[in-house]
Image: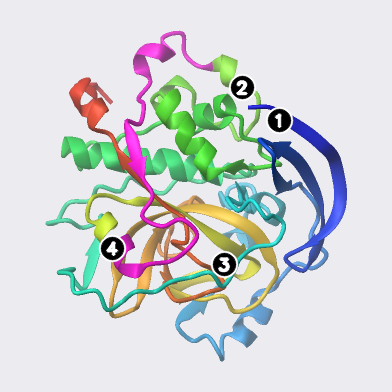
């Protein structure tokens, strides 16, 4: 498919912030991505806590970046929104196009969490993406890892797939980000090897540094479903989650950096763009999704957070992907040493 650049950079106002915006035309559809740009104002913990009087369902605390920016694993604000929007009408987002169907007569448990299924966890430790807008590669590879563990029934031996290979060889960019759908397509067409084949470097353009036997070590995705595409249906997402964790997008705001615990709702701060995460469960009592981030285990609740499923600002679950790895099981991936 032909990709034609229209303009390399122009200043546009997106999410209330004036930022450089790269535009290109692909197949007659206009796409864009926010490029690196300094924030005009850095949100403070005091500002977040002041806003918490109206959003008391979550606790704000000092960000791990404030202690050690380099080792925190949390990218600076300009690298956080690494998921390019799936919407063709960018830069205008449909923030209110949601559907919350809580009344379907289906037999779903009141809570579910892939971190505790009959006392076993199928969720590997939370990684840290650092100073690179690689959230899409982290979330996509993480979803693949978890689905492989579930399909192979190996909670005690988690898979570790190469985020760097997916990022660099798939065409992502630390500054420009990547579309989640493009990452999923790359996993189907090309796959990604184990982490040791090309460890994460938080860089672009290192695809050639992959191990010499990368072809033998690569795992491809067989197929996928999209339970939601531009809307939120709570019970569709729950039903899909019973089959495995879901790759998902969300709208990212500055205040999420200060999340410590509880059920997150947008409280204050600028919109930074879109972010890729993994939904690993839900809680009816909290009316929230349980979400795995890629900012390391020092952030949030050990790297996880709960996101209110009826928050039409954040929209966790508006786009979701459920992976099918049956081909990998047939090809003997479960027996490979790790």
- Quadrant housing residue 1: top right
| Residue sitting nearer the eye, 65 or 286 | 286
Q: CA distance from mark 1 to mark 4?
A: 37 Å
Q: Which mark is residue 206?
A: 2
Q: Mark 1 or mark 2, which is nearer the start of the sequence?
A: 1
Lateral position of residue 314 relative to residue 28, left or right: left
Q: Sequence-wise, which precedes: disc 2 or disc 4?
A: 2
Q: CA distance from mark 2 to mark 1?
A: 23 Å
Give the main secondary structure of the magenta stretch: loop
> Regarding mark 4 in the picture, which secondary structure is present there?
helix
165 in the magenta segment: no
Where does the C terminus fall, quadrant-wise? top left
Q: Is residue 162 visible?
A: no
Question: Does 206 sit left or right of 156 as displayed?
Answer: right
Residue under pointer 4: 238
Above or below 314: residue 177: above
State yes or no: discs 2 and 1 in contact (Cβ < 8 Å): no
* Residue range corresponding to the magenta coloring: 210-237
Tell which of 100 and 214 is nearer to you.
100
């Amino acid at each position: 498919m032909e990709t034609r650049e229209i303009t390399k950079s122009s200043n546009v106002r997106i999410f209330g912030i004036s930022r450089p915006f790269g535009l290109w035309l692909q197949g007659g559809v206009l796409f864009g991505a926010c490029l690196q740009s300094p924030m005009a104002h850095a949100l403070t913990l005091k500002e977040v806590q002041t806003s918490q009087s109206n959003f008391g369902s979550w606790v704000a605390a000092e960000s791990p970046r404030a202690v050690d920016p380099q080792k925190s694993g949390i990218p600076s604000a300009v690298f956080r929104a690494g998921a390019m929007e799936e919407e063709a009408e960018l830069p205008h987002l449909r923030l209110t196009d949601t559907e919350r169907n809580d009344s379907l007569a289906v037999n779903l448990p009141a809570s579910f969490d892939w971190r505790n299924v009959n006392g076993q966890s199928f969720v590997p430790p939370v990684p840290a993406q650092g100073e690179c807008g690689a959230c899409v590669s982290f979330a996509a590879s993480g979803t693949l890892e978890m689905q492989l563990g579930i399909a192979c029934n190996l909670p005690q031996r988690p898979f570790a797939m190469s985020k760097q290979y997916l990022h660099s060889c798939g065409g992502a960019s630390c500054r420009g980000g990547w579309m989640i759908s493009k990452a999923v397509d790359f996993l189907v067409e090309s796959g990604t090897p184990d982490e040791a084949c090309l460890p994460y470097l938080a860089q672009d353009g290192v695809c050639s540094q992959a191990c010499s036997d990368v072809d033998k070590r690569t795992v491809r995705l067989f197929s996928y479903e999209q339970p939601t595409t531009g809307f939120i249906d709570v019970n569709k997402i729950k039903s899909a989650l019973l089959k495995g964790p879901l790759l998902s997008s969300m709208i990212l705001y500055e205040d999420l950096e200060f999340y410590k615990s509880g059920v997150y709702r947008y409280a204050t701060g600028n919109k930074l763009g879109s972010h890729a995460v993994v939904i690993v469960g839900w809680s009816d009592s909290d009316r929230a999704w349980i979400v795995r981030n890629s900012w390391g285990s020092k952030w949030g609740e050990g790297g996880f957070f709960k996101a209110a499923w009826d928050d039409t600002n954040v929209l966790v679950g508006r786009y979701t992907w459920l992976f099918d790895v049956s081909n990998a099981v047939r090809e003997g991936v479960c027996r490979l040493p790790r």
